[in-house]
Image (spheres, rainbow, N blue to C red):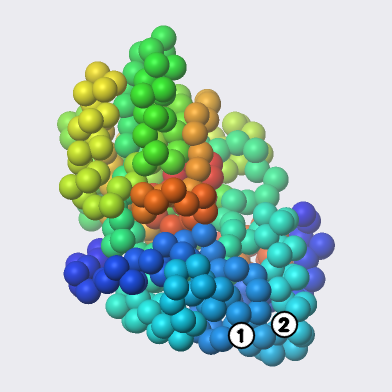
């Protein structure tokens, strides 16, 4: 997915900037200057590095990041799908826009134990409505009722904190649109 | 918060600035100019929407697996051994979500590391500390990122809560 990004071109200074902004830009008139203060870098350099990281694709977008958790939904389930390789894209594109599907990831399988490659997080006001919505997805799947899928409701939450790519003891939390985005569980 | 509590300005803030956030000395003032309001108002508005849980943050979405490497991992642990396994897993600072789910594969957690080799090492360590195989399911593709978001049809608090026609095309 990121084969075109030259990871070696990311410098330590870039990493300092990324680390400093991972919890979000401060809500002050000159946020880049404030970020710069925390890492001994001037405002222009912070801005330039962000610009370059955006051009190289390390930063996919800069902007307001909204919570993708639908309001008023109490129940959720992670539903995993075992689809033929060539069907994954069409199914992912079909279900990810549905408003009760908040996460839709393709993941590597771990055969033979775990053949599932598409992961969807389904929300609903209760368990029953989640299951009904899962049926909507089943009907959109290529094999309909023959599709191999599993519904995994969560029963207990043991830990939840923001992603921490950098090992420094920072307390900022982040959302990376990757594996750890949003709650409930990815 | 109900849909009706969101002003047009709130919806514009949520919708129009998800991409291309200004890279200038006074980005919020630029937003204000486009919205026809003031820098102070925009900053206050974002703070309020953040407090209401609608905005997560103003910032960067980083391409997964560039400045770090993460995976969703799972273990199948007998019910009576769950607590002990959780203790072992949660001891790791690199674990940032850990849920029990109703399946034989019952413990699900996210592990982040500096790179792939670092991640492998953490998972191996976890296997030997816990005594259970760790299954790792790294992300290949995020369909939401690839599609991009438009709150006009994506969100229950937006003006239209219809399923996008593309869902069925």
Q: Which mark is residue B39?
A: 2
> On the image, numbered disc 1 is attached to which residue?
B26
Q: Does residue B27 lie above or below A155 as drawn?
A: below
Horizontal placement of A64 versus B128: left or right? right
Q: Quadrant of residue A10?
A: bottom left
| Residue A140 or residue B108, whichever sits in front | B108
Q: Quadrant of residue A54?
A: bottom left
Which residue sits furthest front?
A40
Label 1 is found on which chain of the structure?
A: B
Horizontal placement of A149 versus B119: left or right? right
- Is there CB contact under 8 Å for labels 2 and 1? yes
Which residue sits furthest top?
B80
Name the residue rendered at 68%, 50% in the picture: A71
Name the residue rendered at 48%, 48% in the picture: A162
Residue B35 lies, in percent from the top left, at 71, 85
Residue B160 visible in image: yes
Q: Does residue A16 lie above or below A131 as drawn?
A: below
Residue B140 lies, in percent from the top left, at 28, 54
Residue A24 lies, in percent from the top left, at 54, 64
């Amino acid at each position: 997915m990121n084969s075109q990004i030259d990871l070696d071109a990311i410098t330590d200074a870039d990493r300092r900037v990324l680390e400093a902004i991972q919890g979000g830009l401060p809500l002050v008139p000159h946020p880049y200057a404030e970020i710069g203060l925390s890492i001994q870098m001037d405002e222009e350099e912070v801005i330039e590095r962000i610009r370059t990281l955006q051009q190289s694709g390390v930063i996919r977008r800069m902007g307001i990041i909204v919570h993708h958790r639908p309001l008023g939904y109490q129940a959720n389930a992670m539903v995993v799908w075992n689809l033929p390789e060539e069907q994954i894209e069409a199914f992912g594109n079909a279900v990810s826009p549905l408003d009760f599907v908040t996460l839709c990831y393709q993941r590597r399988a771990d055969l033979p134990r775990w053949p599932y490659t598409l992961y969807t997080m389904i929300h609903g006001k209760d368990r029953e409505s989640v299951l009904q919505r899962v049926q909507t997805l089943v009907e959109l799947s290529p094999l309909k009722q023959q599709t191999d899928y599993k519904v995994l409701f969560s029963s207990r939450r043991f830990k939840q904190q923001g992603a921490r790519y950098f090992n420094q003891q920072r307390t900022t939390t982040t959302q990376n649109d990757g594996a750890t985005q949003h709650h409930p569980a990815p | 918060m109900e849909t009706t509590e969101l002003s047009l300005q709130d919806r514009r803030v949520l919708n129009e600035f998800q991409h291309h956030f200004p890279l200038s000395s006074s980005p919020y003032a630029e937003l204000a100019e486009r919205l026809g309001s003031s820098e102070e108002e925009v900053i206050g508005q974002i703070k309020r929407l953040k407090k209401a849980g609608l905005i997560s943050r103003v910032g960067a979405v980083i391409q997964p697996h560039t400045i770090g490497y993460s995976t969703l991992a799972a273990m199948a642990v007998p019910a009576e051994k769950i607590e002990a396994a959780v203790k072992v897993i949660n001891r790791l600072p690199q674990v940032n979500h850990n849920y029990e789910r109703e399946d034989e594969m019952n413990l699900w957690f996210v592990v982040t590391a500096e790179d792939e080799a670092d991640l492998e090492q953490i998972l191996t360590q976890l296997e030997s500390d816990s005594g259970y195989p760790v299954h790792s399911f790294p992300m290949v593709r995020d369909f939401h990122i690839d599609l991009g978001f438009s709150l006009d049809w994506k969100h229950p608090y937006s003006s239209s809560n219809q399923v996008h026609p593309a869902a069925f095309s």
